[in-house]
Image (cartoon, grey):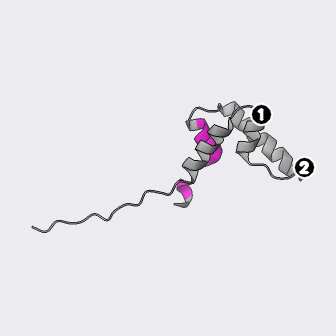
Amino acid sequence: MGSDRRLFGEVAFEKGYITSEQLYEGLAVQAKAEVLHKPYKFLGQILMELGYLTEKQVLEILSELHAPEPTREPVKESVH
């Protein structure tokens, strides 16, 4: 699991909701706020405030990120 975890901005970009420039702008806003010790804002909230994402798009991305991973059934060997 660990390294397969997808990030909000990655999914938003892959879905074509935002451009790479918009993603980097949102991340820069987030980083600047952190440096200035301002209250933390999620990237989705920032991208909505910048007018790049709708609430519906944010919720869609979040539901995709938090969907349970499909479980794989063990392969049953057939005995002849």
Q: Position of residue 43 (x, y in %)?
A: 72, 45
Name which residue lies at 24% across and 65% down: 76
Left or right placement of residue 69 versus residue 66 in this view: left
Q: Residues within 10 Å of mark 2 (few under 14, many from 20)?
A: few
The reply to whether residue 40 is in sight is yes
Nearer to us in this view, 10 or 57? 57
In the image, residue 10 lies in the stretch drawn in magenta: yes
Residues at marks 2 and 1, CA–CA distance in whole angstroms: 19 Å
Chief SS of the magenta region: helix
Quadrant occupied by the C terminus: bottom left
Nearer to us in this view, 40 or 28? 40
- Looking at the rendered structure, the kind of residue marked 1 is Leu
State the extent of the magenta-drawn residues as a range.
Answer: 3-13
Q: Which residue is mark 1?
A: 50
| Residue furthest bottom as drawn | 79
Left or right placement of residue 52 versus residue 30 in this view: left
The reply to whether residue 6 is in sight is no
Name which residue lies at 43% across and 57% down: 70
Q: Position of residue 69 (x, y in %)?
A: 48, 57
- For the residues bearing labels 2 and 1, Cβ distance under 8 angstroms: no
Name which residue lies at 65% across and 30% down: 19
Helix or strand or loop: what does disc 2 sit on? loop
Label at residue 36: 2
On screen, residue 5 above or below 45: below
Q: Position of residue 3 (x, y in %)?
A: 55, 56
Q: Earlier in the sequence, mark 2 or mark 1?
A: 2
- Looking at the rendered structure, the kind of residue marked 2 is Leu
Label at residue 20: none
Nearer to us in this view, 30 or 56? 56
Helix or strand or loop: what does disc 1 sit on? loop
Left or right placement of residue 38 versus residue 50 in this view: right
Q: Quadrant of residue 5?
A: bottom right
